[in-house]
Image (tube, helix red, strand yellow):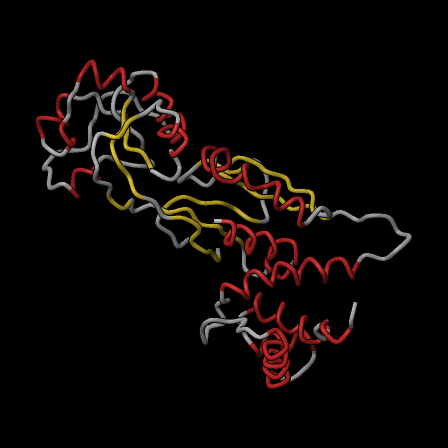
Amino acid sequence: MTTARIPPIQGLLAFEALARLRSVTLAGEELSVTPSAVSHRIRQLESQLGFKLFARADFTLSAEGATYLLRVREALNALQQVPGRGASTTRLRVAVTPTFSRQILLPRLALFRHAYPEVDLILQVTIPLLNVTAEEADVELRFGTGPWPERESVRLQSDQVCPVCSPEYLNEAGPFEGFDTPAAVQRARLIRCPLEPWRTWFTANGLALDEPLGGSQFNDIGLVLDAAVAGFGVALMRLQLGAAWLDSGRLVRLSERSVPSPHHYFLCWKPGTLDRWECAAFVEWLKQSL
């Protein structure tokens, strides 16, 4: 191995601090150097690497910079481990909503565990919209429109919605011919969910219909889709979140059209949380993973 290809540690520390704090002044204070010294170290590192680490003046990472940051944090954490003291572990508590964790997060977590084996990840369930958790979490997944008071956040995922039902229910009550007329909608049993109200679909299709007041209601998106599979009626599905139900044939789309949901998934944390390397690493990893 040739040491000429290894970037200087001062440059790597400056890059990690600037990516986390997004301020040359704050990064300089943390590293006990001037802001101009931080900028100089970043330019040196970019020159050696041959690509830009930041895409914009607000220190948003470039695609290459985001990938490299994960490697830098992994390497810096490894250097902090002292031989002979045994492997130390760091606990990270993440509050997640049920369906997102099952369908999106869990299939990817093996990659995080491989990259950060020293992090003990503790997942706990939070109730969407209410944002209620059993214990205090370091990082929370929240569903809604944001922002939230006393929380910093980053949008993780937006989605499109489309009406779906089981093949059996379609044979029983259909056809619905695009599900974009009052007659088609009123023939169906609508499954209600406060997380994805029907008004999103009605408004996008110019339907002067009120939110249904009767019928089955569930406060979890996964339960809504399982109820549709069981023949309860028609559900309004988030297409990315419900991809497994469509791919398996348990549910079918009633329209070729999809419309943007006004609700999104966010990662949230209290100010100062990302000063802890494990929290910053998880947030950056999940952003890139999605």
Please state which of residues 259 and 1 is positioned toward the viewer in this rendering.
Answer: 1
Expressed as whole percent of the image width and height from the top left, the position of residue 114 reads: 67, 45
Side (left or right) of 177 relative to 155: left
Residue farthest to the right, as pictured: 84
Q: Residue at x 66, y 44 (%)?
A: 113
Say if 227 sits above or below 243 in the image. above
Expressed as whole percent of the image width and height from the top left, the position of residue 190 reads: 23, 24
Residue farthest to the front, as pictured: 1
Please state which of residues 51 and 32 is positioned toward the viewer in this rendering.
Answer: 51
Side (left or right) of 251 relative to 52: left
Please state which of residues 6 and 92 is positioned toward the viewer in this rendering.
Answer: 6
Expressed as whole percent of the image width and height from the top left, the position of residue 228 reads: 32, 22
Expressed as whole percent of the image width and height from the top left, the position of residue 148 reads: 42, 53
Image quarter where the N terminus lies is: bottom right
Say if 129 sits above or below 45 in the image. above
Q: Residue at x 82, y 48 (%)?
A: 87
Say if 269 sits above or below 64 in the image. above
Q: Residue at x 58, y 75 (%)?
A: 50
**Quarter residue 70 falls in:** bottom right
